[in-house]
Amino acid sequence: MCGIVGYTGKRGSVSTLLDGLARLEYRGYDSAGLAILETGQLKIVKSVGKVKNLEASVAEIWPDFENCIGTAGIAHTRWATHGAPTEANAHPHLDNSGKFAIVHNGIIDNYLDLRKHLQEQGCTFKSETDSEVLAHLISQCHEGDLMHAAAAACKKLKGTYGFAVICVDDPDTIVVARRGSPLVIGVGNNETLIASDIAAIAAYTKRVIFLNDDDLALITPDKIDIRNIENVPVSRETAKIDWDIAAAEKNGYEHFMLKEIFEQPDAVANTIRGRLDEAARTAILSGLDMTAAETASVSRIVIAACGTSMNAGMVGEYYFEDIAGIPAEVEQAAEFRYRNPIIEDRTLVLAISQSGETADTLAAVREAKNKGGIVAAINNVVGSTIARETGRGIYLHAGPEIGVASTKAFTCQVTALLLMALLFGRGRRVNRCEGKNLIDEIKSIPELIRKVLARSGEIERVAKKYAGAEDFFFIGRGCMYPSALEGALKLKEISYIHAEGYHAAELKHGPIALLEERVPVLALANDIPGRDKIFANIQECRARKSPVIATATEGDTQISEFTDDILWIPRCSRFAAPIPTVVALQLFAYYIAKERGCEIDQPRNLAKSVTVE
Ligand code: AGP
């Protein structure tokens, strides 16, 4: 959950490293550091807090650090797992000779044994981190060849890693290795970069190489030598990034999250583009790489995901059963491999992940493959580990999602699931007419979102009214239940209000005990099947003096009688309704968090992709 970046070339590593770190900050931001090789010396700077603190410390040492300081260097922005966010625990870590510096993303499970062994060999440790063992281990294994030393060290490691190491004896050289944590190489002209993801590289090159598990690479300004852990050369494809750097900037919005909320009409249009076959009244999902016979043979769909992606999966569960008539279930990815799931050869296991790097979802993919299931992914980051390990799936094409609180990924994931339900449904219970209706519904989604965004001023006014609440309930029925879960998750993540999402019928079985005038309830009461039931639930909440806000379909003349405030949603079918409704809930959470002065893009204790179990 950290971000690492490395540079070797003529551009001057300090400013390049700081720029790269700033673009990786959403991966972790409690401390940072860098190490550069300059005139045969290793220079280290570390600081607690955000990258801008590191920049300040760097400027004290190198006032003109913009001008070509250092030929090769590595840097790190941290999300603490072992040891509090202190300068000593910040990366890079050195060995006792001070010749080797490492930065690491991941968790070394057997670090305590390695640490004890190394201490018995006379090594003294300066931090509480698991990562520091790497510096001492590589130093111990070093017999003149940095790549060999790194490979030897990797053989002793259990757990996950993406690390980079530099050594004073090898100017201009960086060695990297990965197992379980992402690492990409940026191929430049007389310069080479490495990073945890392409966001840190896209400003310098569009040519990238994704490393696989147990790959190592030695890079210099004009050489990239990739080998496996047995020192056998391996070839890896050079891919082209289709993002422009502006996509990773804020474009005038105050926060990445708000920018990404307003990008949703285009992002969803990108997810739909080229995937509707109007003549055949079905969807075209070539990335799934399944023949009509194969889609028809699927007997069950198991969705594995975490967080927002799991909430999207739960909407998909309704789609697959209601539209396509295929039994479907959602698994918390973290549980999947520990509960010995029943996966047959006609079971499609669908991994949903924005980043494609979430450790628990990746492990679910591997478990499903071991069990012989058909495995596919819905992913946003091209070339991510989950995308490469499943080898088939749907890319969202939503563009980079920088805000830690996921927004456009959710609406694009739900749209992709609706496309899948149409494709699988056409082979089963969806006739041509129903196919046409679904296609029209899917095509209308960007406009539905635009209509909600046009009401952002109204939503802000309502949100400000409830910014003082400390507890909140979101309730819904049918596929509005996972939408309620998503609304509550967004509010929790960025405003730190204790918000709970519940199926509206569940309230009576306990949570209703918490309702009173200081606990608002947001009811998803759109004019779709189940509306009359949710009206009854609203009455129950009001009877306990809870203020009630409702999402309601434009033109609904009854709802205002039963509620204190309304978030209006354009009329649409029960299948499309979760998308515009959740956009309204994203804005609701955003404006409450803003009113409370919260750190919206980088909420406390969170990170954008959770690459450890
Ligand atoms: C959502 O806002 C959170 N950032 C988090 O719950 C996220 O959805 C979860 O970690 C899954 O991430 P993924 O989609 O990248 O796998």
Image (spheres, rainbow, N blue to C red):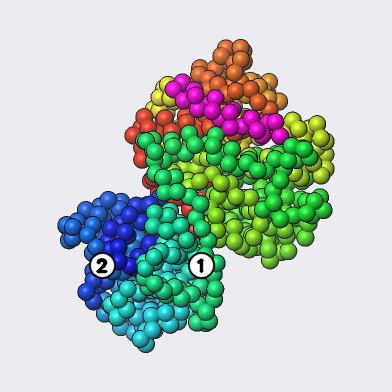
The disc, 2 or 1, on the residue closer to the chain's N-terminal end is 2
Q: Which label belongs to residue 299?
A: none
Q: Is residue 495 visible?
A: yes
Q: Residue at x 37, y 87 (%)?
A: 143
Above or below, 562 relative to 172: above
Task: Please indicate whether residue 257 sits to the left or right of residue 14 in the image.
Answer: right
Label 1 belongs to which residue? Answer: 211
Q: Secondary structure at mark 2?
A: loop
Magenta residues? Answer: 439-459
Q: Principal SS element in the magenta part? A: helix
Q: Is residue 359 visible?
A: no
Identify which amino acid the numbered label 1 is placed on.
Leu
| Residue 569 is covered by the magenta coloring | no
Identify which amino acid the numbered label 2 is placed on.
Gly
Quarter of the figure that contains the N terminus: bottom left
In front: label 2 or label 1? 2
What is the quadrant of residue 532 in the picture?
top right
Q: Residue at x 27, y 51 (%)?
A: 52
Tell me the distance, in whole angstroms, between the alpha carbons under discs 2 and 1.
26 Å
Task: Check disc 1: other Cα within 10 Å, few if <14, some if 14-19, many if 20+.
Answer: many
**Image location (x, y in percent) of residue 270:** 58, 41
Q: Secondary structure at mark 1?
A: loop
**Image location (x, y in percent) of residue 247:** 44, 45
Q: Nearer the viewer, residue 289 or 591?
A: 289
| Residue 449 is covered by the magenta coloring | yes
Label 2 belongs to which residue? Answer: 70
